[in-house]
Image (cartoon, rainbow, N blue to C red):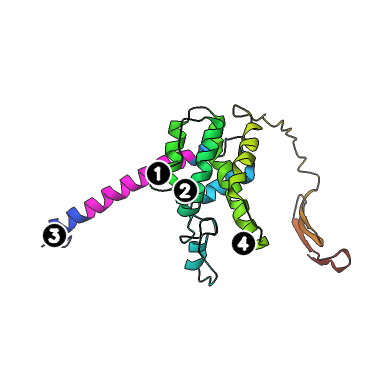
Amino acid sequence: MNSLGSSKNWSIFAKMGYNKIIEDKKLDNLKSWWVSLWKLNAPPRTRLLMWNILENKVPTGSLLKKRAFSGPSRCVMCLQAEESTQHLFLSCPTTRTIWAQVIQSLDLNADWQGVDINSAWEQWWNTVAAEKPRNLPLLVSWYIWVKRNAIIFENNTVDWNLLHPIICAAYTELPNEISQKQPRNIIQEKINKDMPWAYFDGAAQQQGCGGASSCIYPTRITTRLVWGLVPDQTIMQN
């Protein structure tokens, strides 16, 4: 055996490298769907939720359990299984019923199904050609998540049979095509470098504000940071 190892080891490494390339290629293809996600007309909060669903970042019961959360993790919709991203938004019997009701009400020739959320999203995108129906998984997932939170955090009682009319109403309000964003009119101005100039960047909260300003002179730069909890408790630092 030479210093580089046996041919058997090299074949194993080659196979691992090939599998890694295929895996990355699949991931790149999947991320192309994420790019399309941000172009949809559904409200931004629904797009953000769907992105978190595809990334498995939604704080479901099973995910919180992995992070040492000691609370209940059973699905509040069906009370039959542990709440995971795939269960809550894809395979839960109540979710399946809601999807069937919505599809029937909107008379769509498609179905929300797959071995996991990502495959369900890809299949839906490939099956539904029109722009407007592609927003539907975002709306259904959003209202399921809102009602789920209402049960857990507000102790509300939810009639899941009344959810599909709300989803359909939100769907009908969406435009039929993706709206084209108007380009911003940016005016560029030249700065006189012989004159001092400054910029300020700040942020405000309910109880106070904070920010930073910088003054640039021809020979030096002076920066001032400002923090404040309330207006009369402002602290300055040069």
**Front label number (1 vs 4):** 4
Mark 4 packing: few (<14 Cα in 10 Å), some, or many (20+)?
few
Q: Which mark is residue 6?
A: 3
| Mark 4: secondary structure | helix
Our reading of the magenta stretch's main secondary structure is helix
Of callouts 1 and 3, the N-terminal one: 3
**Location of the C terminus (image quadrant):** bottom right
Amino acid type of the residue that numbered disc 2 sits on in the rendered structure = Leu
Amino acid type assigned to the residue bearing label 3 in the image: Ser
Query: Which residue is labeled 2 in the image?
Result: 90
Apparent side of residue 18 relative to residue 68 in the rendered image (left or right): left
Q: Taking 81 as reference, is 176 left or right? A: right
x, y (%) of residue 165? 62, 39
Cα–Cα gap, marks 4 and 2 = 20 Å
Q: Which residues lie in the magenta part?
A: 13-33
Q: Which numbered disc covers residue 152?
A: 4
What amino acid is at disc 1?
Gly
Viewer-nearest of discs 1 and 3: 1
SS label for mark 2: helix
What residue is pinned by disc 1?
Answer: 114
Residue under the point 62% across and 59% down: 151
**Rendered view: 4 above or below 20:** below
**Front residue of this view, candidates 18 and 234:** 18
